[in-house]
Image (cartoon, coloured by chain):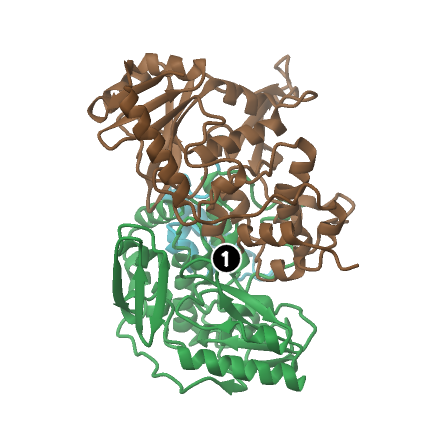
């Protein structure tokens, strides 16, 4: 529901991701991390919920 | 309304006289037009000040938190659902309460009424479903039903869900064709439009926290925005900090919000803060089949685990 | 005292001329509500609104105000040294401030500009500002300024008092600052004796239109401790939800909190409006809170406004009767009623 609310407020869907990985699942961790990095890179730098320096 | 008032007073006086309760929490008339004041009657004499009209907009469950005495409390549909929340969350015991349920016909939006007249409203009287509002220059009659607060016009639980006495007859519960039209409209926007929509929505917020304080769900001893060690969120009039406050405050109400509208009634800047909580209400319903505050034997969905909880979001 | 007459069709042009030398502030509509804000180049102040939701105190006391800055960059000679922020204090004028709000700024000055201490931020902003007030011809039902040593045509704290005469304004010049502003705007036609008489009539009518009387005459003699220990505070405070609305909309509430924020190498120290309604306001580092209970906080607000301030400065109460808190309070706690109760209170022997 939190992810939904963030998306509702205008955060891009792929910017916040959830996964459940056991400490024994090294391959899954690596794959997921790569996928997350790729999808976030595709979105470009985040400007939302970033505090300016005023 | 008039008959409601008589019954409320009679019940409250009897409760106090018989010693069944120590106090009765309800509303009394305000000092300005279209205002009621949450009020605690300690004696039968004081209970005669209790009233009821179309301006009982705050949620009385807010006044129950951690009280120790035996309490009689006036409850419309939404108040009763927040009383259920309070009982479930151990903020009050069911045994302490004598709930005087009031079937609700909806509360009006005073700011909307003001737009109907050029000059300021100096009086507002009520007979049946008709309100007579007057300025120094003009007087008009309107129907309550046409000027309800937005949350009241979307309400499908006007009757109290829990009570010991019921004032008057239960009212018919409205059936809505499209209860989440407002949420759907935001969902249809693209990400940047959504972001700008909420930016614009919060323009004008002065961080007085009236929305939080009027909310019966917000009873934390120290709210996350007031925490100083660690400090979760900046304190200035910075857009990101303001949005962070509203986002997290809303999320803390997930699966608990009854859409009572106290937050918006209290906001001095007329900010539509329910735009956040409405999404959570819709998701609670769609993902968990849940409506908050309906049953004292059930805990809210984010407070429990079930093997069939929706988990599509986990990769 | 000089009174000038201004045609309404020359008003806008005059303001535009003044804009070249002054930054103008005025009441403008932001979404559904009116607030005082800096006027944009092509923006005119709305001279019809009597009670903006927020008072114009923000023009000299912004809700968030940068006080000091520092750099953490050790290659700079002044690293880790707080220095006063670079704030623009060039001349500015607040157009359309109502008399009770100007009176409020005068009262707040007693706090920020004392014999011993001068708050440079508030005072520099105040010194840079010309207050061009606008008399209230038709007071709202919430207005009780005449009971609070102010009134719809009160001149205290103002540099110019404008009176709306329908087709034009009469401008009563009260200080050299006011005179300079009017000269800058090019307004110089002297009013006639007939105009002045009409102005007096409007003043009388406006004062009579305020029907709420609040009694303050006994407050000075009352014992502070008697009032502090009075039994009515629990009842006054019951409905209070401790939001800060009353303190935020109040033109005389001046309390603030100071915060430091650092991003990268840049540190900023700024102050924010704070509120005695919040428990955090008085929370000590030890964990002790002298005003931990709601009743104590509600009592503090009324005692400060109506008793402590009066005792300390002997300049009347710290309430100017604008009625904003009465109008904005979500639970209708009415300072007029509380003041009357305090004024009439006799302790049980």
Q: Residue furthest left?
A: C9
Q: Is residue C105 above or below residue C300?
A: above
Residue C216, how many percent across, how many down?
A: 60, 44
**Is residue B124 left or right of B20 when viewed as pictured?**
left
Residue B159, how many percent across, how many down?
A: 42, 81
The mark total stands at 1
Closest to the observer, C301 or C290: C301
**Is residue C316 left or right of C13 when viewed as pictured?**
right
Label the brown chain with its letter.
Answer: C
Residue B24, how many percent across, how many down?
A: 59, 75
Closest to the observer, C164 or A33: C164
Disc 1 sits on a residue from what chain? C
Q: Which residue is mark 1?
A: C332
Q: Residue at x 33, y 44 (%)?
A: C31
Label the cyan chain with its letter.
Answer: A
Closest to the observer, C188 or C46: C188
Q: Residue at x 54, y 80 (%)?
A: B298
Q: Is residue B260 above or below residue C109?
A: below
Residue B280, how many percent across, how many down?
A: 43, 64
**Is residue C227 left or right of B124 when viewed as pictured?**
right
Q: Is residue C311 above or below residue C123?
A: below
State which quarter of the image contains the N terminus of chain B. Answer: bottom left
Q: Is residue B276 above or below residue B56?
A: above
Label the green chain with its letter.
Answer: B
- Is residue B243 visible in the rendered image? The answer is yes
Q: Residues within 10 Å of mark 1 (few under 14, many from 20)?
A: many
Q: Residue at x 61, y 84 (%)?
A: B15
């Amino acid at each position: 529901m939190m992810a939904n609310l963030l998306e509702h407020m205008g955060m891009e869907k792929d910017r916040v991701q959830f996964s459940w990985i056991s400490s024994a699942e090294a391959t899954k961790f690596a794959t997921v991390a790569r996928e997350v990095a790729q999808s976030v890179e595709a979105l470009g730098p985040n400007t939302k919920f970033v505090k300016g320096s005023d | 309304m008039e008959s409601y008032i008589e019954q409320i007073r009679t019940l409250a006086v009897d409760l106090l006289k018989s010693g069944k309760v120590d106090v009765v929490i309800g509303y009394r008339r305000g000092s300005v037009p279209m205002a009621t004041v949450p009020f605690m009657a300690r004696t039968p004499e004081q209970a005669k000040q209790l009233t009821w009209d179309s301006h009982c907009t705050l949620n009385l469950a807010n006044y129950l938190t951690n009280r120790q005495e035996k309490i009689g409390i006036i409850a419309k549909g939404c108040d009763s659902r927040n009383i259920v929340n309070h009982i479930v969350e151990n903020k009050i015991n069911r045994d302490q309460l004598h709930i005087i349920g009031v079937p609700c016909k909806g509360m009006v939006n005073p700011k909307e009424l003001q737009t109907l007249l050029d000059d300021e409203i100096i009086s507002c009287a009520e007979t049946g479903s008709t309100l007579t509002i007057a300025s120094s220059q003009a007087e008009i009659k309107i129907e309550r039903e046409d000027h309800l607060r937005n949350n009241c016009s979307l309400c499908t639980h006007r009757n109290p869900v829990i009570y010991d006495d019921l004032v008057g007859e239960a009212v018919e519960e409205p059936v809505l064709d499209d209860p989440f039209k407002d949420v759907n409209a935001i969902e249809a926007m693209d990400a940047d439009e959504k972001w700008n929509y909420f930016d614009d929505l919060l323009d004008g917020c002065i961080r007085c926290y009236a929305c939080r304080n009027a909310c019966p769900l917000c009873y934390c001893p120290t709210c996350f925005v007031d925490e100083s060690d660690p400090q979760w969120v900046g304190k200035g009039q910075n857009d990101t900090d303001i949005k962070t406050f509203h986002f997290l405050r809303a999320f803390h109400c997930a699966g608990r919000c009854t859409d009572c509208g106290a937050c918006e009634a209290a906001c001095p800047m007329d900010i539509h803060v329910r735009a956040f909580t409405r999404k959570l209400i819709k998701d609670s319903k769609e993902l968990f089949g849940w409506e908050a505050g309906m049953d004292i034997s059930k805990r809210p969905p984010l407070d429990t685990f079930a093997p069939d909880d929706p988990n599509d979001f986990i990769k | 005292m000089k009174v000038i007459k201004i045609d309404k069709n020359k008003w806008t042009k005059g303001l535009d001329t003044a804009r070249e030398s002054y930054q103008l502030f005025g009441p403008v509509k932001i979404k559904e509500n009116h607030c005082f804000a800096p006027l944009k180049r092509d923006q005119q102040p709305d001279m019809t609104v009597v009670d903006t939701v927020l008072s114009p105190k923000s023009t000299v006391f912004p809700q968030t105000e940068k006080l000091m800055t520092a750099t953490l960059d050790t290659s700079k000679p002044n690293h880790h040294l707080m220095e006063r922020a670079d704030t623009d204090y060039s001349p500015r004028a607040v157009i359309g401030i109502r008399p009770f709000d100007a009176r409020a700024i005068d009262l707040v000055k007693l706090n920020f500009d004392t014999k011993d201490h001068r708050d440079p931020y508030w005072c520099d902003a105040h010194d840079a500002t010309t207050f061009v007030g606008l008399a209230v011809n038709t007071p709202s039902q919430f207005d009780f300024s005449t009971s609070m040593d102010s009134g719809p045509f009160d001149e205290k704290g103002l540099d110019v008092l404008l009176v709306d005469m329908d087709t034009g304004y009469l401008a009563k010049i009260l200080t050299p600052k006011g005179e300079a502003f009017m000269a800058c705007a090019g307004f110089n036609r002297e009013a006639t004796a007939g105009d002045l008489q009409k102005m007096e009539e409007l003043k009388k009518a406006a004062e009579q239109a305020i029907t709420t009387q609040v009694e303050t005459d006994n407050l000075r003699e009352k014992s502070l401790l008697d009032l502090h220990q009075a039994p009515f505070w629990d009842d006054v405070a019951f409905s209070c939800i401790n939001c800060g609305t009353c303190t935020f909309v109040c033109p005389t509430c001046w309390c603030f909190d100071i915060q430091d924020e650092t991003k990268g190498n840049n540190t900023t120290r700024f102050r924010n409006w704070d509120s005695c309604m919040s428990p955090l306001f008085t929370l000590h580092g030890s964990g002790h809170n002298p005003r931990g209970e709601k009743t104590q906080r509600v009592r503090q607000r009324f005692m400060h406004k109506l008793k402590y301030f009066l005792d300390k400065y002997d300049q009347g109460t710290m309430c100017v009767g604008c009625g904003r808190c009465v109008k904005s309070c979500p639970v209708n706690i009415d300072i007029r009623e509380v003041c009357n109760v305090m004024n009439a209170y006799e302790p049980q022997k």
